Image (tube, grey):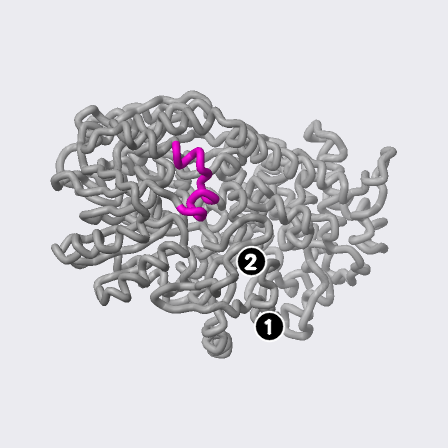
């Protein structure tokens, strides 16, 4: 009868449990788990699916039922009793149930409502025999102190007559009402629980994907791959790249080098033979570009991608659904993972699969590129996450890496580009008192008529759209507009076009160009903005410094939109700092200007409050949740599940694409829905509730707002302000 028990339609239950345990033993070894945690992980692997030995699950797996009793819940009595018998042998408290928590939550996140209301399952008559056979197969995998199987079976009998769900809310002793088993699981040591669950999940996924070896989850010969890559580049290594490679034994690296000088190669040389490399960037666009770049270095199969649209992008580029690539990439399990910083922070805010991400990061080499790009609240979250769970190695990198920012982090080995690189003068700076929208159009057209590729950067979507409309009115055809309020399909097309501009192109954009696109134009016209943002914008013209200094025009008067976005004091400081620069500033001058601004900004009380708020939010949320995954149905918790202060957005479907969205679903191409979506500020939904309609069958909000392929989403005239004082831009 045991042979008849199935885990999957084509896999016997015992075979699956043994394979998961075998893989779990190797993963636990590679992750360096202690003897105690390794034993717990193996126990979880061995018993995670024993609950499939129920009569209704066996009927379900053979197609006789549409739904089965949750097998993770049916496994609970066995792992609970076994772990209770194991704890004294491991010298641990009787209340340490990491394996139990991992098994219970291996299909549903651990939380206060998990499995409430379920009745008792009907266990299969072959269960006892299956348990004995499983125990025989486990010999040799290194699990110390497992209980004698007949004693385990005897001890578990008194629990099989009641509902496993009732066990979760049964008092476990103590004076507090919350000291139920559910409460004990929430209060487990977080890192230990996360490690055990990570091993179980990774082993289970590998077994299901029929991967015989966890080796592909770990990076091998990384230095060799990087060396082969740099050998293909023009010329020898720069001096700062050599120094980065020479300091690869340093646990922390602070790297500062101008744009276009080989900063990424320096970081990879320092990373060397790390068994796991996690490379974090500010935006999806920069992440996508780096993902493709690192695939050429390490090989496509080794490099994963993690951000909000990664699943769509991976599916778009594959003939079939790349489930393994999506799954392992999303939890940082590929040997090299390129992700947005948001994905790292959401793991520390207890988003889905936080256990795998955080367990893997702790033994990883973590690179934080473009570290200058984050607001103080986000930096606060980051600092607290790094303080609580530092990675094995850490690198911070930026072309503008000001000392005041570095002082927030533990001291690292500073590697800086050589003086001759900083001496480059790539720009010819001109400050103009007028407004970009009023005076910049003719200037942009004049340069474009000469065949120059012109970049125009506004501070708000509304101003960028207004500038673009003037180009339309002037009849200039070589134009493009990019901002955050285009559907993803249009944005992809636009990014491809502006990355390969034709002579005479005028590219109008918002801040999305600051850290999103690898482009090099001939002329820049920009609205006044904070110095560090302007330096990034300037980096998009004459990017590699191979041409004479490129004209940069900064329009120093600001609109209400710019003032609300950046603050009047910040804009005034930036204007004064720019006024003190040479008309042909070197990269060193721009670095000093950024430092001067940071010294002013970081000394301000508002900046410090935001930083402290980020740190306090992460600390409070982790203490509140313990081992639970955040429940986003809880409004109070959802408000704190944000990595960017004041930038919470929701994706909506413009009304004109509604018919196309339903057609995609009818054709079985629902995975393509992200092509039609656009992010809008969350507060728009409340402020203009009459313009948003829920499409429950698609799980989307329909936005009844004007949308044009050239201009993007617009707000109707007269609806440009919000009672809270914010503006729609």
What whole-number distance in Å separates the C-alpha atoms at marks 1 and 2?
22 Å
Along the polypeptide, which appears first: circle 1 or circle 2? Answer: 2
Q: Is residue 527 above or below residue 2?
A: above
The quarter of the rendered structure image containing the N terminus is: bottom right
x then y, percent, for residue 551: 19, 43
x then y, percent, for residue 250: 37, 23
Tell me the number on the disc at residue 684. 2
Kindly identify which residue carries mark 1: 697
Examine the residues drawn in magenta and state their main secondary structure. Answer: helix
- In terms of secondary structure, where does tag 2 sit? helix
x then y, percent, for residue 16: 57, 55
Q: Does residue 358 appear in this view?
A: yes
- As drawn, is 193 to the left or to the right of 516? right
Q: Are marks 1 and 2 in contact (CB under 8 Å)?
A: no
The quarter of the rendered structure image containing the C terminus is: bottom left
Q: Is residue 88 above or below residue 42?
A: above
Give the residue displayed 56% in from the left and 58% down from the top. Answer: 684
Q: Is 562 contained in the magenta span? A: yes
x then y, percent, for residue 451: 13, 56
Q: How many marks?
A: 2
Instruction: Specify start and end residues of the magenta stretch as a single range.
Output: 559-572
Frontmost residue, 118 versus 414:
414
- In terms of secondary structure, where does tag 1 sit? loop
Tell me the number on the disc at residue 566. none
Q: Does residue 130 appear in this view?
A: no
Q: Is residue 332 above or below residue 658?
A: above
Label 2 crowd (10 A; few <14 / some 14-19 / many >=20): some
Image depth: mark 1 or mark 2 in front: 2
Frontmost residue, 343 versus 421:
421
- As drawn, is 95 to the left or to the right of 308? right
Q: Is 260 contained in the magenta span? A: no
Give the residue displayed 72% in from the left and 41% down from the top. Answer: 185
């Amino acid at each position: 009868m045991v042979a008849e028990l199935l885990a999957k339609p084509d896999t016997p239950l015992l075979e699956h449990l043994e394979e998961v345990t075998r893989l779990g033993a190797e993963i636990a070894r590679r992750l360096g788990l202690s003897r105690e945690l390794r034993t717990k992980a193996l126990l979880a692997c061995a018993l995670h699916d024993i609950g499939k030995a129920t009569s209704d699950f066996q009927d379900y797996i053979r197609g006789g039922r549409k739904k089965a009793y949750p097998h993770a819940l049916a496994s609970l009595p066995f792992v609970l009793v076994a772990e209770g018998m194991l704890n004294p042998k491991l010298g641990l408290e009787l209340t340490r149930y990491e394996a139990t928590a991992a098994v219970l939550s291996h299909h549903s996140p651990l939380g206060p409502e998990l499995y409430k209301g379920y009745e008792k399952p009907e266990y299969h008559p072959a269960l006892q025999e299956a348990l004995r056979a499983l125990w025989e197969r486990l010999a040799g995998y290194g699990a110390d102190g497992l209980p004698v199987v007949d004693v385990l079976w005897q001890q578990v009998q008194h629990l099989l007559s009641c509902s496993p769900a009732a066990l979760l809310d049964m008092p476990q002793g103590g004076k507090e009402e919350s000291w139920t088993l559910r409460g004990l699981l929430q209060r487990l040591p977080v890192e230990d629980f996360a490690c055990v669950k990570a091993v179980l999940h990774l082993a289970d996924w590998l077994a299901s994907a029929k991967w015989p070896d966890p080796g592909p989850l770990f990076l091998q010969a990384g230095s060799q791959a990087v060396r082969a890559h740099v050998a293909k580049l023009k010329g020898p290594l720069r001096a700062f790249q050599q120094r980065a490679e020479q300091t690869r034994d340093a646990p922390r690296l602070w790297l500062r080098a101008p744009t276009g000088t080989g900063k990424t190669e320096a970081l990879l040389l320092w990373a060397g033979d790390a068994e796991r490399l996690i490379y974090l960037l500010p935006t999806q666009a920069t992440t996508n570009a780096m993902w493709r770049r690192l695939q050429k270095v390490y090989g496509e199969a080794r490099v994963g991608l993690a951000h909000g649209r990664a699943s769509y992008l991976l599916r778009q580029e594959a003939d079939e659904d790349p489930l393994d690539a999506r799954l392992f990439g999303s939890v940082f399990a590929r040997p090299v993972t390129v992700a947005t910083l948001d994905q790292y922070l959401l793991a520390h805010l207890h988003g889905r699969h936080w256990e795998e991400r955080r367990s893997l990061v702790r033994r990883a080499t973590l690179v934080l590129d473009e570290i200058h790009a984050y607001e103080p609240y986000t930096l606060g979250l980051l600092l607290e996450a790094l303080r609580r769970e530092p990675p094995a190695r850490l690198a911070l990198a930026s072309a503008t890496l000001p000392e005041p920012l570095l002082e927030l982090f533990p001291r690292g080995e500073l590697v800086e580009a050589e003086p001759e690189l900083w001496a480059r003068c790539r720009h010819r700076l001109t400050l103009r008192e007028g407004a970009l929208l009023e005076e910049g159009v003719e200037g942009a057209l004049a340069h474009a008529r000469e065949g120059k590729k012109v970049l125009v950067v506004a501070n708000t979507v509304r101003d960028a759209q207004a500038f673009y409309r003037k180009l339309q009115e002037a009849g200039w055809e070589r134009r493009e507009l990019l901002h955050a309020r285009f559907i993803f399909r249009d944005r992809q097309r636009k990014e491809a076009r502006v990355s390969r501009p034709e002579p005479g192109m005028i590219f109008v954009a918002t801040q999305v160009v600051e850290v999103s696109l690898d482009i090099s134009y001939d002329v820049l016209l920009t609205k006044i903005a904070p110095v560090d943002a302007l330096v990034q914008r300037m980096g998009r013209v004459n990017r590699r410094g191979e041409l004479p200094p490129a004209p940069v025009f900064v329009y120093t008067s600001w609109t209400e939109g710019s003032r609300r976005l950046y603050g009047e004091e910040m804009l005034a400081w930036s204007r004064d700092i720019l006024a003190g620069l040479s008309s042909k500033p070197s990269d060193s001058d721009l670095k000093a200007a950024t430092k001067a601004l940071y010294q002013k900004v970081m000394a301000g009380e508002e900046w410090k409050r935001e930083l402290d708020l980020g740190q306090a939010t992460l600390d409070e949320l982790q203490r509140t949740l313990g081992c639970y995954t955040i429940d986003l149905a809880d409004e109070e918790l959802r408000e704190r599940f944000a990595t960017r202060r004041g930038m919470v957005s929701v994706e909506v479907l413009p009304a004109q694409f509604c018919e196309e969205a339903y057609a995609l679903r009818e054709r079985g191409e629902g995975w393509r829905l992200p092509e039609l979506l656009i992010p809008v500020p969350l507060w728009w939904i409340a402020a203009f509730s009459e313009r948003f309609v829920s499409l429950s069958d698609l799980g989307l909000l329909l936005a009844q707002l004007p949308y044009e392929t050239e201009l993007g989403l617009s707000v109707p005239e007269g609806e440009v302000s919000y009672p809270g004082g914010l503006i729609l831009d």
